[in-house]
Image (cartoon, helix red, strand yellow):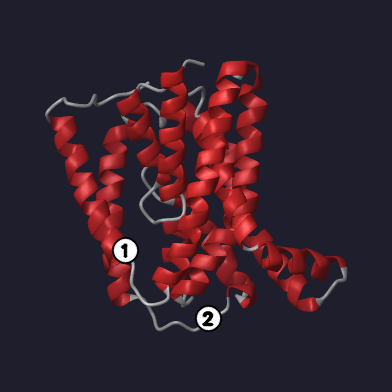
Amino acid sequence: MDPASLLSAALIGIVEGLTEFLPISSTAHIRLTQLATGFQDRGETFAVVIQLGAILAVVAYFWRRLAALTVGVLRREPASLRFAWALCLAMLPPGLIGYALNNWLEQHVFGAYELVIIAATMAVGGLAILAIERWRPEPRFADSATLPPLTCLWIGFMQVLSMIPGVSRSGASIMGAMCLGVERKAATEFSFFLAIPLMLGASFLKLRKHQGEIDGAFAGAIAVGFIVSFIVALGVVHWLLKFVASNTFRPFAWYRLAAGVIIALLLALAIIPMRVG
């Protein structure tokens, strides 16, 4: 792949690392960056697989807790088994529904007026965050490892919303958890842990389906995006956990509203095309 394409891959990796765990939709930002740079993805494979770099950053950041969880499960310790079961419950809705709708989404949503959908969902998502921050119930659960099973299942259903372009995966799970009485930092941590199996599964499906389209050059671009997203996301994870300890998500809500309006204006003025793909 030529240097310009590798530079685009690195830029998209930076965008992915910055946005994957913030409630502002990494998919929307990656799609816009691809459009701006002219980078050609293949069946959304690049966008999904470089997310593994960001997920690896979570694994690196929480490796002690993940190692303790793994050992605890192998030893059948009740606390570890409960947390593992909670993650499995939260995985069920997005895993099953995502697998069932993957082909339909590729054919009818991604590329089909996708930017129009993104403009709308960015703005609506911003309003939703403002509403949740104002009217959410008093937190009842402050530990991400001890959430009730039903709460975890409902967080999983909230995660399904992120299948819509412009709806943030982390935002859906964090805001959904907060609506269910989960404290802000605990909701953020649970979103991090839930992302690991979900994104591994999504990447496996994309690679399996589009493996014939990945030649040496495209694989090189994926590798660049993967490495860059890992480095950037590692810093973002550390920063976000400190940020939510003493701040609300309102700044991200206002950012989403502004981004939605700007994208809508660019579409209306035909500066960017209504339909991409």
Number of disc labels: 2
Q: In front: 85, or 235?
A: 235
- In the image, farthest residue toward the right: 75
Please identify the quadrant where the C terminus is shown: top left
Residue 210 location (% of width, % of height): 61, 23
Residue 208 location (% of width, % of height): 67, 28
Q: In front: 238, or 201?
A: 238
Q: Is 169 positioned to the left or the right of 93 in the image?
A: left
Q: Is 37 positioned to the left or the right of 63 in the image?
A: left
**What is the three-letter code of the residue carrying label 2?**
Ala
Residue at screen point 27% across, 66% down: 130
Residue 232 location (% of width, % of height): 47, 48
**What is the three-letter code of the residue carrying label 1?**
Ile
Residue at screen point 50% across, 29% down: 44
What is the quadrant of residue 113 in the picture?
top left
Above or below residue 267? Residue 40 is above
What is the quadrant of residue 39 in the picture?
top left
Q: What element carries label 2?
A: loop
Q: Is 68 positioned to the left or the right of 86 in the image?
A: right
Res. 40 visible in picture: no
List the residue tagged with mark 2. 142
- What's the CA distance linking mark 2 and mark 1? 20 Å
What is the quadrant of residue 34 in the picture?
top left
List the residue tagged with mark 1. 129
- In the image, farthest residue toward the left: 269
Residue at screen point 18% across, 42% down: 262
Whichever of labels 2 and 1 marks the residue nearer the N terminus, that label is 1
Above or below residue 260? Residue 189 is below
Q: In front: 174, or 53?
A: 53
Q: What element carries label 1?
A: helix
